[in-house]
Image (spheres, rainbow, N blue to C red):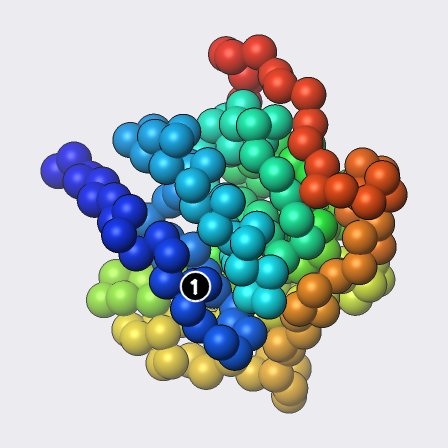
Amino acid sequence: GKTTIVLHPDRLQLPLSWKSPRRIFVNSMSDLFHEEVSVDFIRQVFEVMAEAKKHTFQILTKRHKRLQALACELDWPTNIWMGVSVENQYWADRRIPALLSVPAAVRFLSVEPLLQPVDLNGYLGDIQWVIVGGESGRKARPIDPAWVRKIRDDCVDANVPFFFKQWGGTTSKSGGRTLDGRIWDRTPPRQPSPGRQAPSAWRKGNPPRMPCLPSGLDG
């Protein structure tokens, strides 16, 4: 059935009350850039994230067109990390270019569930983190270790932090998460330095914005 989006504006200020630095996955069960989430609400979320500088916020979306269209209306301080889901090569070749146009200090890829080979070469020079995982659930489809190793090796060669989340299976922990005898759990620094691997806009010293794009984006 149709997904119901429920907004909780009363909870927006919660991160400002947390005293210890946290790494926060924004909308872990939904998508901040869903078409039913208003632009005004997205702006409010970004304003709170910018104010809560000691926390690191991770946003993951499948709505690459809306992300790209709205990015110019948002500020991108270094504590906001932006990622896209990449289920296969088709979506890699559409979502990653949109992500690369966004001036986030950390851009990351969630390559899960990995169900077929995905070639990230050509993209990794502007990506700061890659997460890979297999599918879990009663009808979980298998993952080929060769697919995982190819992405891992490409990340190592490009010096991009690689995080292997799970092999998957009936439950998320069924197959463990050991790859070639070790745990791969590299992550970017909590607060990357402005300009370190981000677009040149960061060198100006202020959270960047980008030129607004016309509607009707391809891809």
Tell me the residue at 22%/41% (across/down): 5
Tell me the residue at 64%/43% (across/down): 76
Tell me the residue at 52%/78% (across/down): 20
Image position of 1 with respect to 15: above or below: above
Measured as percent of width and height from the top left, residue 128 is found at: 72, 56
Image position of 88 with respect to 79: above or below: above
Quadrant of the snapshot with the C terminus:
top right
Judging from the image, what secondary structure is the residue with disc 1 in?
Answer: helix
When asked about the image quadrant of residue 147, the answer is bottom right
When asked about the image quadrant of residue 135, the answer is bottom left
Image position of 102 with respect to 118: above or below: above
Tell me the residue at 62%/19% (across/down): 212
* Residue 85 visible in the picture: no
Measured as percent of width and height from the top left, residue 139 is found at: 25, 61
Quadrant of the snapshot with the N terminus:
top left
Measured as percent of width and height from the top left, residue 29 is found at: 31, 55
Q: Amino acid at mark 1?
A: Pro
The mark tally for this picture is 1
* Residue 213 visible in the picture: yes
User: Which residue is label 1 attached to?
Assistant: 15
**Label 1 neighbour load within 10 Å: few <14, some 14-19, many 20+:** some
Pick the residue in front: 62 or 10.
10
Q: Residue furthest left?
A: 1
Pick the residue in front: 45 or 96.
45
Q: Is residue 39 left or right of residue 53?
A: left
